[in-house]
Image (cartoon, rainbow, N blue to C red):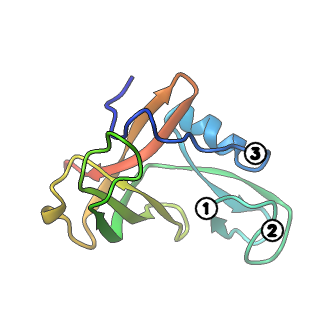
Amino acid sequence: MTERYFPDGMPPPMADGITLPWWQAAAEHRLLVQRCGSCGHSQLPPSPICSECRSEDTGWHEVSGRGELYTYTVVHRPIAAGQELPYVIGVISLEGSGGVRMISNIVDVDPEALSVGMPLEVAWEDMSDDLAIPRFRPRAD
């Protein structure tokens, strides 16, 4: 188990036929983006069709889990009992993803130390043996 950032009372995410491969990779601590086989467009969250050309020829591309902070907000109200405050929700521009931005929590940092453009890396939060959630923290380098 990795470090836990959120309380057990948080509802788990729901997987469906489109998102299941993404969640399965996440359980293995691999971060994927969906990529169109017709036009090369990358997207996240996944969809049954490409949002750029409407092709159904979509597949998965693994990315490094590195990126930079595009924008963020600091939250001061809990959404679950036992949640530590404040917490940060950020938009992360994922490196090597073809321009994909992902929404997640920024952890292991004082919110006052955050800045747009800050280099980040994925920090996996294992919720169970088959569920891991990608959070992000400042990169060591």
From the viewer's side, name the closer residue of 81 and 94: 81
Residue extending furthest front? 81
Q: Is residue 102 left or right of residue 56?
A: left
From the viewer's side, name the closer residue of 22 and 125: 125
The residue under label 1 is 44
Residue extending furthest right? 56
Callout 3 crowding tier (Cα within 10 Å): few <14, some 14–19, many ≥20: few
Disc 3 is placed on an element classified as: loop
Rendering coords of residue 6 (x, y %) = 37, 40
The residue under label 2 is 38
Contact between labelled residues 3 and 1, with CB atoms less than 8 Å apart? no
Q: CA distance from mark 2 to mark 1?
A: 17 Å
x 33%, y 69%: residue: 72
Contact between labelled residues 1 and 2, with CB atoms less than 8 Å apart? no
Earlier sequence position, callout 2 versus callout 1: 2
Please state which amino acid type lies under the numbered disc 2.
Ser
From the viewer's side, name the closer residue of 21 and 84: 84
Tell me if residue 92 comes above or below residue 87 in the rendering. Answer: below
Earlier sequence position, callout 1 versus callout 3: 3
x 75%, y 72%: residue: 39
x 80%, y 68%: residue: 38
The residue under label 3 is 16
Earlier sequence position, callout 3 versus callout 2: 3
